[in-house]
Image: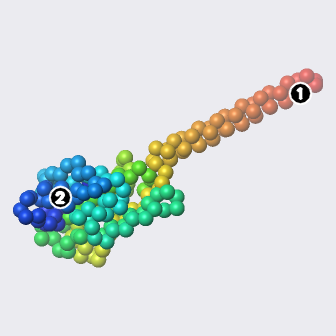
Amino acid sequence: MIRAAPRLVPDLGGAGAEAAMRELLSGPGRTVERTRERRDSRIEGALTFDSPSALCGAPLLRRECRFQRTAEGGFELSMKISVPTGSPGGPTTGPTGTDAPPAVEIRIQTEGRILEHNSEGPIGRGNVLAWKRTPDLADLGDDGTLRVVADGTSVFAYTARTVGRSALIALLITAAGLWLVVAEGRRRLAREKGR
């Protein structure tokens, strides 16, 4: 999902910002699910894509975009997004821009675990990363590059492995405890018979 201030969506012959967002995100390997104008006047586009390479080919995002597979089967994505300097749309308060919505917001949900990212916030529920940039950050020298490194292991597989390991450890601890109880019982029985 991509959210951008209307001034960041190029005008395509007066078709409107929503239509322009749809046109600038659609193409081979990309399906635009919806575009809409939010209450804060930003334009939102939700899309799915076959591969990060297809995402890099979107006209709205076709700038400095690099995608490569990692040795572990994951991927590394680096994409430069234009964030204007200054705040002509209204004041913001510092680097987080708490009073005004960010000029650009991109939400990414990957199947694999996100290992590294340059977002200010944590990874949300459902393995969703929200990357936001405000004009203030651009003024402070932020280059507006989104960076994400994801693992090849799906979150479900990783969780299943973790639960499986925990269950195995619990089983081993229980078995060791039972073995100690039985051994102690046998030792006591042997002592009682020896008397």
Q: Is residue 66 left or right of residue 92?
A: right
For label 1, the residue is: 191
Task: Give, as a three-letter code, the residue at label 2.
Answer: Glu
How far across and down, in percent of the image, does residue 170 sit? Answer: 62, 38
The coloring applied to the image is: rainbow
Quadrant containing the N terminus is: bottom left
Q: Residue at x 85, y 24 (%)?
A: 189
Is 161 situated above or below 101?
above
Quarter of the image for residue 168 reads: top right
Count the marks: 2
Report whether residue 175 is seen: yes
For label 2, the residue is: 23
Dot 2 lies on which element?
helix
Q: Residue at x 75, y 33 (%)?
A: 179
Task: Give, as a three-letter code, the residue at label 1.
Answer: Arg
Quarter of the image for residue 123 reads: bottom left
How far across and down, in percent of the image, does residue 130 sit? Answer: 31, 57
Q: Residue furthest right?
A: 194
How far across and down, in percent of the image, does residue 143 sit? Answer: 30, 74
